[in-house]
Image (cartoon, helix red, strand yellow):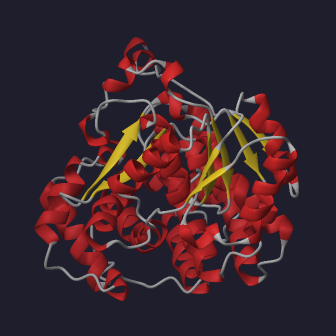
Amino acid sequence: MAADASRLTGNWNYPTAVRFGAGRLKELGDICKEAGMKNPLLVTDPGLAGLPMIAEAQAVCKEAGLGFGLFSDVKPNPIGKNVDDGVAVYKAGDHDGVIAFGGGSGLDAAKAVALMANQSAALFDLNDEDWENIPASKIPPIIAVPTTSGTGSEVGRASVITNDAVHVKRIVFNPKMMPSVVLADPALTLGLPQKITAATGMDALSHNLEAFCAPSFHPMAEGIAIEGIRLVKEYLPAACKDGTDLVARSQMMIASSMGATAFQRGLGGMHALAHPLGALYDAHHGMLNAILMPYVLIRNRPVIEGRIARLSAYLGLEEASFDGFLSWILALRAELDIPNDLSALAIDTSKAKLVGKMAEVDPSAGGNPIPLSASDYSRLFEAAVTGNLAIG
């Protein structure tokens, strides 16, 4: 009893204040003022920069008597230069806060801009321990406005930024990067194309699923993950079938935030592979996780089979077992037009050894239910390229 009880220990955190509901973008100006901003910089991606929602955000801020700046030179997989350029715009405009607006790329870049706005060190010179030396007063306030339902970066204390000099994705962590307020307006996702809705929704599923399977002790995060998975099951197909379904869009935005809350419990092999693949091939992160999902599940089957059976029962699957769950995942991917293998993304096996080495040292690898070596990850990657589900 004592030995078992000794394992029941952990450090738990939960996200920030969230204002959720359709049409709440109109509150942005007041939220910025409450955070102490007078002249915010809105950071987003170029695809959103010219859309009416950005013009509305600017108008709302001006109506509140605020200044306003815009920076949108952000790649789909943000790189260090995007952050450096954003910091330069922040300083040149004498801004005093950041509005992180968009999907994962815009949110991650924006949080990193805020982190580095008043730092003398270079972004990639900071390590995981350096956050302790960065005073909270040096990080301006951040307001997050998500426009996709996938990464959950709006409730995260980290950003994923690619060091393009060495083609490695870095997880830049600092607890003070957590936005002070999240303005979650699901109406902003109504124009999202079906393909992006599917890929980001599968990303939300991967966060919840890997968090559920992670071996660390965090029962509250486990409970959140289970419900997040149920929401994806119930509402992702509907959101993809009818992009104007505001109920489905709302529930998927909730599932996304739940996934990012839950994955403090850990991630795993899906993300350990997706991060290097995103850096090497500049592929969409959510799509990578969607394709990798069944391969990683099968590789982890020996230790997660009972857990997945319990999850299957909660989801109400006809067959409450690992096989029943895997069948649901494969059917969901087919319904959403997710490819079966990585070759559909023009990825081949030529870099298998490099991918394996990068995956082994990725921070997400520590949460995988089974410790995997570089060669294990190389074989898993090759299976995902060739579509070979007969792995284990």
Depicted 178 relative to depicted 292: above or below: above
Q: In this view, does 33 lie to the left or right of 328?
A: right
Q: Is residue 267 visible?
A: no
- Quarter the N terminus occupies: top left
Query: In the depicted view, which residue is nearer to us: 250 or 146?
Result: 146
Q: Position of residue 240 (x, y in %)?
A: 70, 79
Q: Position of residue 103 (x, y in %)?
A: 58, 60
Q: What residue do we see at 65% from left, 48% from top? A: 257
Residue 149 location, x and y as percent? Answer: 65, 61
Determine the residue positioned at 59% across, 51% down. Answer: 152
Looking at the image, how many numbered discs can be counted on the residues? 0
Residue 173 position (above or below residue 268): above
- Residue placed most toward the observer, 40 or 192: 40
Q: Is residue 113 left or right of residue 385?
A: right
Quadrant where the C terminus lies?
bottom left
**Position of 59 compared to 391: left or right?**
right
Q: Which residue corresponds to the image point at 49% horizontal and 67% vertical from the top-left?
A: 286
Q: Which of 66 and 102 is in front in this view?
A: 66
Q: In this view, does 232 lie above or below 120?
A: below
Front in this rendered view, residue 357 or 79: 79
User: What percent of the width, then of the height, locates residue 373?
Assistant: 16, 53
Q: Can residue 175 be seen in this view?
A: yes
